[in-house]
Amino acid sequence: MYETVRMTLAAIRDEMGDIDKKIIRLIARRQQLAAKIARFKHREGIPVHDEAQAQEVLNRAYNFAAEEKIDPAAVQEIFAILVTMSEERQRECLGDGNLP
């Protein structure tokens, strides 16, 4: 019986690992879009940091997390990191960042 539980646990962990890979791929795609945004902002003379947009992203994440019944404050923290990563990518595309 214990072996069956372990196999099931391993399968669940494998599925979670697959989801983690998908999340990372989506973050990479988000970073690619940040590069496109940087080019647009540069062309239009718009600064990288846009407080209103950042707040909109954080609010949207909070609300959607609440709808999905997961901790909205934790999700909002994750999205704050994603916003910071996007801004850093934009700066890097403009020659001002410190990304590799």
Image (cartoon, helix red, strand yellow):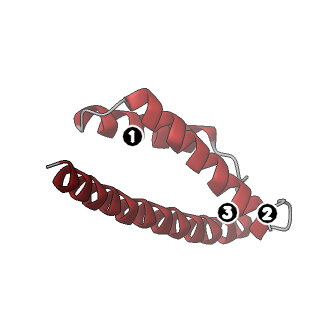
Per the rendering, the mark at residue 5 is none
Task: Examine the rendered structure and indicate whether residue 79 appears above or below residue 32.
Answer: above
- Amino acid of disc 3: Lys
* Viewer-nearest residue: 17 or 73: 17
Report helix, strand or loop for mark 3: helix
Residue 45 appears in view: no
With 62 as the anchor, is 9 left or right in this view?
A: left
Q: Residue at x 73, y 52 (%)?
A: 47
Name the amino acid, label 2: Leu
Q: Residues within 10 Å of mark 1 (few under 14, many from 20)?
A: some
Q: Quadrant of residue 43?
A: bottom right
Task: Give the spatial CA distance, label 2 vs label 1.
Answer: 27 Å
Q: Could you say whether the residue bearing mark 1 is in a helix, strand or loop?
A: helix
Earlier in the chain: of badge 2 and badge 1, it is: 1
Which residue, given by chain and number where applicable, does mark 1 sit on?
A: 60
Which residue position is annotated with label 3? 41
Q: Which residue is mark 2?
A: 99
Say if 60 sits above or below 35 in the image.
above
Q: Is residue 11 visible?
A: yes
N-term-proximal mark, 2 vs 3: 3
* Image position of 54 (left or right of 65): right
